Amino acid sequence: MQRTLKPKVREFSSVRERAYQYIQQQITSGLLVAGAGISDLQLAKDLGSNRTPICEAMNKLAAEGLLEENAGGGMIVAQLRREHIIELYELREALELYAISKAVLKPMVPSEQERIQKAIDLVGELENELRKAAQDKLNPDQMKRFLTSDLGFHALLVGLAHNSRLQKVISGTRLLISAFNIKRLGHDAKTLRRIRTDHQTILEALRRQDGETARTTLLEHLQVGQKQLLLEYDETRREDTLRLHVPAIFLE
C-alpha cells in the first residue's frame, strides 16, 4: 500500500513546485504585474493538473508576500506599497550586514573572489555600453541584465557566510524587491559607476578581512539604493495619478 502512495506524493509535490516556480517567474519577469488576478483554474489547465497543488503553491507565494487575497475573492499579485519597500530594506540591511560580519572571519578562496568580481565587471560592461552608444540611461533589456548582476553580487556576498537558512530568507527578500525593480527607470552612467565602486570596495575589504570597511560601505550602499527606489516609486505613483485624472497630457 505504501509503495503505491509514494510516487503519488512525489508527483503532487512536483506539480506544486512547478506551479510555484511558474507563478514566481511570471511575476519577476513582469508578465504578471502588481494587482493582476491569478486563476487557479487557468493554472491547473496550463500545467495539466488539478487545483489542489496549484492552490498549495499560491498559498505558499501568499505567505512569502508575492500574492495577496483580493477583496472580491481569489488571489492577485501583491502590490508593494511604500512602507513595504522600507520594511524590506530594513530587513535586508540587518541580514546582509550579519552575513558580511560572518564572512569576514575567514579568508576568501580564489573561486569566491572570481565569481564576485565577475558580477562587478558586468556592471562595468553596461557602463561602457552606455558610453559607446551615447545613451543617457539603460534600456529595459540592459536594466534586466543589471538587476541580474546586482542580485548575483549580493547573493554571492551572503553565500560567503555559509548559512543556508540565512540565504533562503535573504533570497526571498530580494525576490520581493526585484519584482518591483522590473518597473524601475533605467540607471545612468553615474549611478552605475557608484554601484560598481561600492561593490568593488566591499570585495577589496573582504579580501583584507576588513570588516569595518565592508560593513560601512554595504550599509551606505543599501541606504542609497533604498532612497533611490523610494524616489522612483513616488514618481511612478504621481505619473499613474496624472494618467488617471489628466490622460490628455500623455497623448502624442
Image: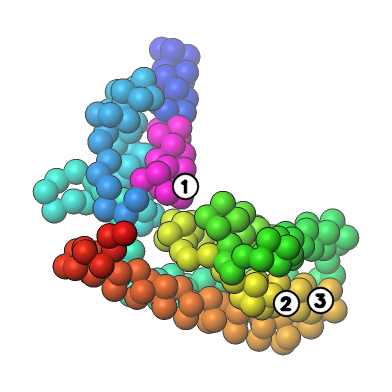
- Magenta stretch encompasses residue 82: no
> Residue 76: image x %, image y %?
26, 48
Residue at image location 25% in from the left, 67% down from the top: 249
Q: Secondary structure at mark 3?
A: helix
> Quick one: 57 or 178, which is closer to the camera?
178
Q: Position of residue 101 (x, y in %)?
A: 68, 77
Looking at the image, residue 183 sits to the left or right of residue 138; the answer is: left
Farthest residue, direction left:
72
Nearer-N-terminus badge (2/3): 2
Magenta residues span 16-32
Q: CA distance from mark 3 to mark 1?
A: 32 Å
The disc at residue 197 is 2
Q: Which quadrant holds residue 64?
A: bottom left
Label 2 – label 3 distance at C-alpha = 10 Å
Quadrant of the rendering where the C terminus is positioned: bottom left
Residue contact at pointers 2 and 3, CB within 8 angstroms: no
Which amino acid type is shown beneath numbered disc 3?
Answer: Glu
Q: How many marks?
A: 3
Describe the element under mark 2 as helix, strand or loop: helix
Please report the residue visible at 71 percent of the width from the left and 80 percent of the height from the top: 214
Q: Is residue 243 above or below residue 78?
A: below
Residue 221 in the image, given as x and y percentages of width and height: 60, 79
- Amino acid type of disc 1? Ser
As drawn, is 36 to the left or to the right of 200? left
The earlier-in-sequence mark between 1 and 2 is 1
Mark 2: amino acid: Thr
Q: Label 1: which residue? A: 29
| Residue holding disc 3 | 204
Instruction: Tell me what residue is drawn at x 36 percent, y 45 percent.
Output: 32
Q: Within 10 Å of the Cα at label 1, are there few (<14), some (14-19), or many (20+) other Cα atoms? A: some
Residue 206 lies in what quarter of the image? bottom right
Label 1 sits on a secondary structure element that is loop
